[in-house]
Amino acid sequence: MFRYNVECMGTGFLFQIEEDTDHHGLPELCKSAHEVLQDADEKFSLYKQNSEIMQLLRSEISWDEASDQQRFVLEEVQRWNHLTSGFFDAKPHTPNYDPSGYVKTWATLNAAHYLLANGVRKFTINAGGDVYLSDELDSPLLNRVGLSNLRSISDKNSGSNLVVDLAGKSFRAVATSGVSERGEHIWRKDEQAAFIQVSVIGPDLLEADIWATSIISGGFPAWDAFLKATAGKLVAIAFTNDGSLFGSPGFSSVLANV
């Protein structure tokens, strides 16, 4: 198995490519995929003072002058705000505009599409705990994804308490949002902060990640909106602050036999 590990956007990205793939040229292809991530970071980072988004927030450039990518992301976060009944909220057109919850996953998919376009067919990308699996992936190992046991990876007791097996399934994405790794980094609409970790599994990483973030933000009303909007097209498991566990209909179908 070929592995390529990089850091970008304040998190780690792990590319894993199946053993039967011709390894010739993979380092350069993964390096170029990394550059796709870096390009997004240069445009959208709220921690780089010269990034395009920071220039927009300081009104140094206008939205009419913004790049096509910047305008596309603005349109997308507004669209997802509508699709999630307002629970995914990047606060567009305010001084607090922050599309980070969209950008990392969007950039990950762009990196995946770059690899696919260049003939790499069987691989996964772990983007800080959110996992993309290519459609043609055969490896039983890579088709299994562990869900965090609510401990930071810096904790010696961190690991997985559940494993999902996506071999032969249309679900090709696992997205997890929560507080164990980065604390309270998601704007909460739910003052009770009911959910401390949510994992969403579905065909598309972006949709899964947006719903995971939305449920953390919105609590039980967002959970209900997720069930209504997705109607089994995605499945999820959620941990609450009182130790309860909620699984959506169909979640058991993706659990691995271990």
Image (tube, rainbow, N blue to C red):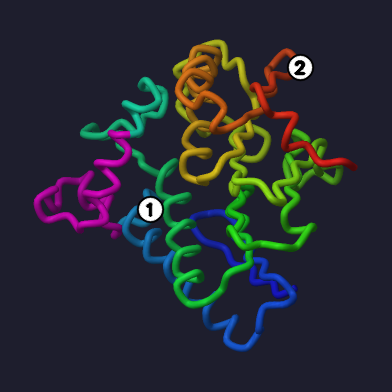
The quadrant in which the C terminus is found is top right
Residue drawn where x is 71% and y is 62% of the image: 138
Say whether residue 22 is visible: yes
Camera-nearest label, 2 or 1:
2
The quadrant in which the N terminus is found is bottom right
Label 1 crowd bin: few (<14), some (14–19), many (20+), radius 10 Å: many
Residue drawn where x is 73% and y is 58% of the image: 142
| 21 relative to 130, above or below | below
Q: Is residue 169 left or right of residue 87?
A: right
Instruction: Name which residue type carries label 2.
Output: Gly
Q: Is residue 71 left or right of residue 23?
A: left
> Between 257 and 111, which is closer to the camera in this rendering?
257
Q: What x and y, as percent, mark residue 35?
A: 44, 71
Query: What numbered label is drawn on residue 45?
Result: 1
Q: Which residues are magenta?
A: 50-79
| 198 relative to 48, above or below | above
Q: What x and y, as percent, mark residue 54?
A: 27, 50
Say whether residue 34 is visible: no
Mark 2–mark 1 CB contact (< 8 Å): no
Q: What x and y, as percent, mark residue 229?
A: 45, 23
Residue drawn where x is 73% and y is 19% of the image: 245
Q: Exactly how many numbered labels are in the figure?
A: 2
